[in-house]
Image: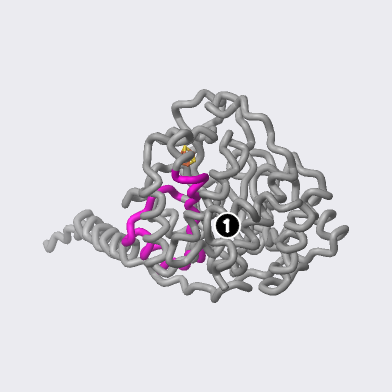
Amino acid sequence: MKVNPNYNTKETLLALYNKPLLELVFEAATIHRQFHNPREVQMSSLISIKTGGCSEDCGYCPQAARYNTGLEAHKLMTVESVVDQAKNAKANGSSRLCMGAAWREVRDNKDFDTVVEMVQAVNNMDMEVCCTLGMLTEEQAQRLKNAGLFAYNHNLDSSKDFYKDIISTREYEDRLNTIENARKAGITVCSGGIIGMGEAIEDRVGLLLSYMEMETPPDSIPINALVAIEGTPLEQQKPIEQWELIRMVATTRIAFPESVVRLSAGRTKMSMEAQALCFLAGAGSIFAGDKLLTTPNPEFNEDKEMFDILGLVAKEAFADGEKPVSNPDPIIEAKKAKAEVRAKELEEASFQPRKVTVE
Ligand code: SF4
């Protein structure tokens, strides 16, 4: 049951969201147990492979070039440094590595070739690889799939109505198209939202309704609480109550019984007790490590302690789908072959036979 038929309208979803909290959590916990192992929580790590300087105007994002947030921009990381970070994440229990680049869209250039190599390298370490790189064409999605990408993240952020208040540089439709392109390429879809941006409850429910309208809802639905960053248009937003995040996790769990609900940004503001209620209500993943792209996150050690206290176990990689195969990338292979031919030509051109004088 990908979508719960009892909650597929605005009215029924709103009534669900507004249920007495403990009843809502109980219903979510019951559904969660039918479709998932409630003791398993996936630890994922999210690294920023290219930071800042983004041309978009997402009102919550410190990486938008137009906001003065003091964030230091970095060009694309090397494959070697990504592999080092992946090794560290894996050693600390993460089974999924998400790589985020602050791009409006993917361009068919050298940087994208490097990302393709990153995907191949991390998939070959037996970790689930997820990328969030902005808008994506179907051909680009196919290249990532061929390299071994497990998931593509592209959040709808909020309802279609509220989206316009937060982002003006692209349309909701653009987001839906990218999700569709990833889906067509056979990549699992990770897409969710942020609460606490000043939206109404109807917008939270509206986000879930957008996923209901898809032919196949996302395999993963990350739920984030806004981390208000100084210098962004949303800097003055007050942090949401922990209860609101628990409600949103529980409602999402019930509405999409098979999807993995990911408790994402905003955990630093949550007590362990509140996080425990989120796990009870069906959160099946957290982001581990001290950074979530550019925002703070609890340290690996704190999470290990929480897992011990709550009796949770870290979920293995590929528990929810087969490991993709990493195939050679035709574009990179063609470039390599061309470079080899060129190197040979240069070598031959510079070869000067020794002059032999016969007396
Ligand atoms: S959320 Fe992504 S697209 Fe939007 S400004 Fe930040 S990096 Fe750019």
Q: Residue furthest left?
A: 359
Q: Which residue range is magenta in the image?
A: 133-160
Q: Residue furthest bottom?
A: 322
- The residue to which callout 1 is attached is 221
Q: Residue furthest right?
A: 309
Viewer-side residue, 178 vs 108: 178
Colouring used for the render: one colour
Q: Is residue 199 above or below residue 17?
A: above
Corner quadrant of residue 201? top right
Question: What secondary structure is found at the residue carrying circle 1?
Answer: strand
**Is residue 134 on the magenta stretch?**
yes
Residue under the image location 31 percent in, 62 percent down: 331
Corner quadrant of residue 252? bottom right
Residue under the image location 36 percent in, 49 percent down: 173
- Report x, y in % for residue 150: 51, 66
Identify residue type, mark 1: Ile
Q: How many marks?
A: 1
Residue under the image location 64 percent in, 49 percent down: 264
**Is residue 353 on the magenta stretch?**
no
